[in-house]
Image (cartoon, rainbow, N blue to C red):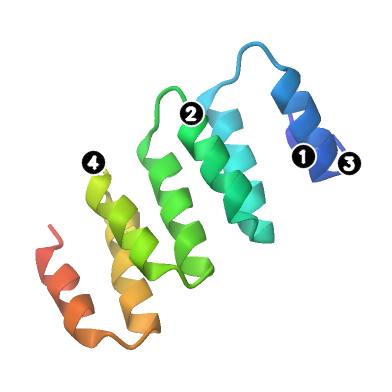
Amino acid sequence: MDLGKCGSLDDARTIFDGMCEKTIELWNTMIGKYVSIGDLAIVRELFDKIPERYVISWNTMIFGYVKAGEVANARDLFEQMPEKNVVSWTTIVGAYADVGDLKIMRIFFQKMP
């Protein structure tokens, strides 16, 4: 189902909530849409409800925190990630660069595989 054709995010959320079976792609789409409007409360609610998180789920949630300036929350979540990819690493390195904490940025950069 293409939730992007529902008209509004509220309509898409209503349809999403009413679905019996939700794919990981639908979960990630909803999380991404709420990240784009900066509604971290709903982003976190959805993230916490995902039955099985994939790296894109984690990365989108971390990006949401970074976008909102919540670098400490982004780092906490990054540290909890069971599997990180290049997007995970560049997001956290970029977050510390953005806030000017070059010491922590360098630490994460040096840990990158």
Q: For this rendering, which residue is in front, 31 or 77?
A: 77
Q: Quadrant of residue 38?
A: bottom right
**Mark 3 vs 2, N-terminal side:** 3
The residue that mark 1 highlights is: 4
**Mark 3 vs 4, N-terminal side:** 3
Q: Residues within 10 Å of mark 4 (few under 14, many from 20)?
A: few
Position in image of residue 43 (x %, y %): 57, 46
- Residue type at mark 4? Glu
Position in image of residue 110 (x %, y %): 10, 71
Q: Is residue 14 above or below residue 33?
A: above
The residue that mark 2 highlights is: 50
The residue that mark 3 highlights is: 7
Label 4 or label 2, whichever lies nearer to me, is 2
Q: Residue at x 27, y 85 (%)?
A: 101
Position in image of residue 35 (x %, y %): 60, 55
- Residue type at mark 2? Ile
- Residue type at mark 3? Gly
* Label 1: element kind: helix
Q: Residues within 10 Å of mark 1 (few under 14, many from 20)?
A: few
The residue that mark 4 highlights is: 83
* Label 4: element kind: loop
How far apart are labels 1 and 3 at the CA level? Answer: 7 Å
Q: Is residue 95 visible?
A: yes
Label 1 or label 2, whichever lies nearer to me, is 2
Q: Residues within 10 Å of mark 2 (few under 14, many from 20)?
A: some
How far apart are labels 3 and 4 at the CA level? Answer: 35 Å
Q: For this rendering, which residue is in front, 40 or 109?
A: 40
